[in-house]
Amino acid sequence: MALTLRGNGQISSDNYTIDSDGGVTAVNAAVSGTLGVTGTTSMAGNLNINAQSSKINAANNHLILHDTAEADTGANHWYMYRNGGDGKLRFFKESDKLTLDSVGRLGVPNQPHMLAQGFHERYGTTDRHLFRTVTTNTGNHWNNTNGKFTCPVAGTYLVTAFSGYTQAQAFIGMGIGYNGSLLSYGWMHENLNRHAQSSVTIMKNASANDYFYYYLNTSYTTPISSVGNEHHAHFSVYLLG
């Protein structure tokens, strides 16, 4: 590598320029080992880390992460950056995957969860049951045709089931089913004149492809099923992590 001493006091090579006050400008330079920097460092291009698997983008100050086994293109990039408009720290891959605001509130827009309301009917001859309205179904893991919420990943799930008014004045047995078996369950007495009310909530460690469902004992009555009574029954599942 040739060094050139210029009349303005600069020393330059193919990749570096050192000016008279000690400032260093690097162009397409690679550093092997530890790079120590004291003071402010300005960057005109990308700062690549670990053979371009990570980089800091000079144009917008995004930290870009990607696997070196993947093509170095936007579709494979994870971005971490702070938005000047709302001040949130964002983890972004084609859309926001996680946000953190200035007071520490975490947002996970695609966290799997569902809420179905308004008891509708039994699914075939099973003890699974369907609902009139699917209020939310992030990730589409609830199937309102077969009455299953299928877990997309292993984790801890918060599951709730509710009945507040029965179809007939009779006993009702309601709970949460898991992989074809009863997980949590309660009875309401027929003497309550259809006003029997029950709520079941449980946290469960589940594996990917396990499933939860709204369980009813098929020998007894159900929640009221007519249109307009959606508030009298619901089922929800939320992946806690």
Image (cartoon, rainbow, N blue to C red):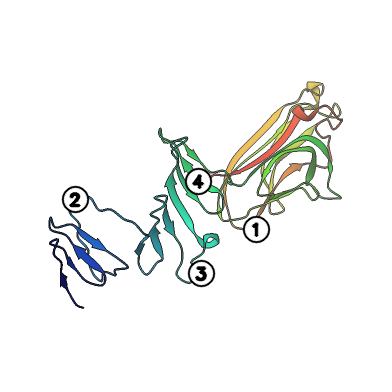
* SS at mark 4 in the image: strand
Towards the viewer: 106 or 132: 106
In the visual, does 34 lie left or right of 214? left
Q: Amino acid at mark 4?
A: Leu
Q: Amino acid at mark 2?
A: Gly
Residue farthest to the front, as pictured: 7
Q: What numbered label is drawn on residue 39?
A: 2
Q: Are marks 2 and 4 in contact (CB under 8 Å)?
A: no
| Earlier-in-chain disc, 2 versus 3 | 2
- The residue under label 1 is 209
Q: Amino acid at mark 3?
A: Ala
For discs 2 and 4, the disc positioned in front in the rendered view: 2
| Earlier-in-chain disc, 4 versus 1 | 4
Label 3, label 1: how far apart the Cα atoms are: 31 Å
- The residue under label 3 is 71
| Earlier-in-chain disc, 3 versus 1 | 3
Q: Are marks 2 and 1 in contact (CB under 8 Å)?
A: no
| Earlier-in-chain disc, 3 versus 4 | 3
- The residue under label 4 is 98
